[in-house]
Image: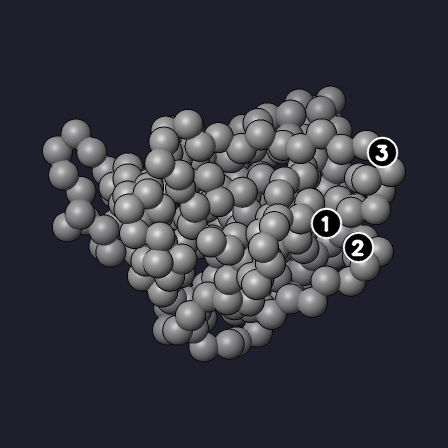
């Protein structure tokens, strides 16, 4: 039951990560990314309501060796944590750095209960691309809550924070387009007193417990199902840390939005 898979059935295009830019220092050991490879899988156990991510406690030497770049999306941050990841073909998991957003599908039970993300059917973007985009959306919605004076006091009035404030309308438009996609895809699956979030976790749990062969094939069964992060994916303290430490190049924003609008309005 691998934690890393290539997403099936998707046509390679230019990476949103590449277009939006990974504004961080590259990891010491360069990881090779393509749009639909190295994707975090949807995971659940028999007791999915107890599936909460518990970060590994590593020594300073171990952390330095692994680094702070997410194994899946490549995002580098001081708030990233460490987890066991089972690579395709390996018999035992290895320790890797994983960002908060790439953990969401891997612990679908905890994600559902804590309302940190919701499922959507999306053929245009991979899970890691969704995470790269929603990192900006979440941070932008956080920034606009504060006045310029408050932002300065919090230390989030840097160039990145200013860009997030100025482009909030565009980012909200992208969020609305993706949310509408999710509602259209799953509206027939919503029943009284329940949501597709819980059904997805329950079904994955059933497969993991009763049909291990189908569970191992879940990336094909749930082809193009992604988890959309919500504002609860980051705490206020984590939002502040991300805004402060992100190295931002303003010249990249126009081509990023142009590409994304083309994707969702094709």
Give the residue at x 37% y 61%: 217
For image coordinates 62% across by 48% down, the residue present is 93
Q: Disc 1 on helix, strand or loop?
A: loop
> Which residue is at the far front?
91
Q: CA distance from mark 3 to mark 1?
A: 15 Å
SS state under label 3: helix
Residue 140 visible at all: no
Q: Nearer the viewer, mark 3 or mark 1?
A: 3
Query: Quarter-wise, where is residue 27 in the image?
Result: bottom right
Of residues 170 and 69, which is closer to you in this image?
Answer: 69
Q: Is residue 106 above or below residue 7?
A: above
Say if 149 sits above or below 257 in the image.
above
- The residue that disc 1 covers is 69
Mark 2–mark 1 CB contact (< 8 Å)? yes
Say left or right for 107 vs 184. Answer: right
Numbered badge on residue 27? 2
Q: Is residue 210 left or right of residue 60?
A: left
In the drawing, does residue 68 fall left or right of residue 134?
A: right
For label 1, count other residues whose C-alpha is less than 10 Å away and answer few (under 14), some (14-19) or many (20+): many
**Between disc 3 and disc 2, whose residue precedes?**
2
Question: Alpha-carbon neighbours of circle 2 within 10 Å: few (<14), some, or many (≥20)?
Answer: some
What residue does disc 3 label? 60
Label 2 and label 1: CA atoms lie apart by: 6 Å
């Amino acid at each position: 039951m691998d934690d890393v898979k290539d997403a099936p059935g998707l046509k390679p295009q230019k990476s949103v990560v590449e277009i939006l830019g990974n504004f961080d220092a590259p990891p010491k050991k360069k990881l090779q990314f393509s749009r639909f490879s190295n994707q975090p899988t949807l995971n659940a156990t028999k007791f999915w309501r107890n599936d909460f991510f518990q970060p590994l406690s590593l020594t300073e030497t171990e952390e330095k060796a692994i680094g702070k770049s997410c194994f899946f999306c490549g995002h580098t941050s001081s708030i990233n944590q460490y987890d066991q990841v089972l690579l395709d073909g390996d018999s035992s998991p290895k320790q890797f750095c994983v960002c908060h957003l790439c953990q969401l599908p891997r612990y679908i039970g905890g994600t559902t209960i804590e309302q940190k993300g919701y499922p959507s059917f999306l053929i245009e973007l991979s899970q890691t691309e969704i995470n790269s985009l929603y990192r900006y959306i979440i941070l932008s919605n956080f920034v606009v809550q504060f006045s310029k004076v408050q932002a300065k006091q919090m230390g989030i009035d840097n160039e990145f924070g200013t860009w997030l404030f100025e482009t909030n309308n565009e980012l909200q438009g992208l969020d609305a387009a993706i949310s509408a996609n999710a509602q259209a895809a799953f509206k027939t699956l919503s029943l009284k007193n329940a949501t597709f979030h819980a059904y997805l976790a329950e079904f994955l749990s059933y497969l993991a417990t009763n049909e291990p062969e189908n569970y191992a094939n879940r990336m094909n069964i749930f082809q193009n199902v992604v988890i959309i992060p919500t504002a609860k994916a980051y705490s206020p303290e984590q939002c502040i840390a991300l805004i402060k430490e992100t190295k931002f190049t303003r010249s990249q924003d126009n081509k990023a939005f142009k590409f994304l609008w083309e994707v969702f309005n094709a």
